[in-house]
Amino acid sequence: MGYVLGAFLGVVAGAACIVAVGGVVGIVAGLAAAALLYVGVGQLLKPERKLGGVVASMLPDGEAATERIDAARELDRQIGRRRAKICDAQVGRETEDLQHDIQALIACVEEQPATYRRLAHFLSTYGEQCVRMLDGYLSVERLATPELVHGAREDAIEALCALQGAAQGELARATGSKAADLEASSEAIKRLMEMDGYRPDEPAAPDGADVKGDTDTAAGAARAGRGER
């Protein structure tokens, strides 16, 4: 919507410059004004991207996480384009499974931007190799003899399964780090409760209850029942 408004204002401003100035200078000024308004208004009104419910530009790792997410989505698109050309059903299914694993890793980083390094590691280590492997398999599938295609099929399936394992491993590390942080926070809360005299595993006493007084009364009643003085 921002770029549509920018285009409209640019056309209006450009036409005004042409009418006001006239000649070649007016045309040049009008085109420059139109371009500047189109880009400027479009950028100003462009909605800011959010990660984990927070505007990305406000996060310490927001820019880095956004760049890796965009790169991963581009990798996913490249894999998808190659998947559409694959004839073998099993290779196609393994390729789709790999896409699902990459998408899950992307979703994790979108929710937890601080884990973007896991996605970055997958991209830098396996991204280019993945695309190259699929291109090689497609070339063999298209041009080679059935015997060569069979061998390439087995190699491709093995490689795709390995890539799935790598993506799943990075996802496990990313979510495991978050789980470890949660456990540490939970332990810290329990220690604070114990310092305040609470027992996390025991129910809290009602408001205004005198725990010590209740205990003494119960003990006295027990002694009286035994005939103690």
Image (cartoon, rainbow, N blue to C red):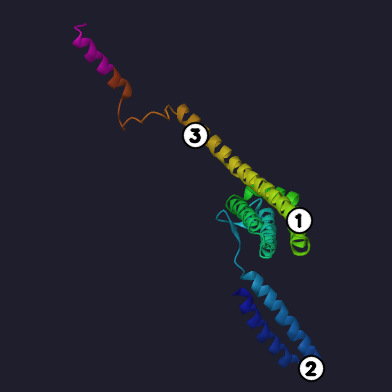
Q: Where is 175 relative to 223, above or below? A: below
* Observer-nearest of 110 and 99: 99
Q: Amino acid at mark 3?
A: Ile
Q: Residue furthest right?
A: 24
Q: Amino acid at mark 2?
A: Gly
* Dominant SS type (magenta): helix
Residue that carries the numbered disc 2 in the rendered image: 23
Q: Amino acid at mark 1?
A: Glu
Task: Kindly state the secondary structure of the residue where label 1 is placed.
Answer: helix
Cα distance between the residues tagged 2 and 1: 71 Å
Residue that carries the numbered disc 3 in the rendered image: 189
Is residue 132 shown left or right of residue 227?
right
Residue 132 seen anywhere in this rendered image of the structure: no
Cα distance between the residues tagged 1 and 3: 64 Å
Task: Identify which residue is drawn at 78% across, 86% down.
Answer: 28
* Observer-nearest of 45 and 123: 123
* Observer-nearest of 176 and 24: 176
Q: Check the picture and name the quadrant holding the N terminus.
A: bottom right
Task: Identify which residue is drawn at 68% across, 57% down.
Answer: 72
Image coords of residue 75 (percent x, y): 69, 59
Q: Where is 140 relative to 206, above or below? A: below
Residue numbers of the magenta segment: 216-229
Please give the label number shown on residue 21. Answer: none
Please give the label number shown on residue 147. Answer: 1
Front: mark 3 or 2: 3
Say which label, 2 or 1, has the lower sequence index: 2
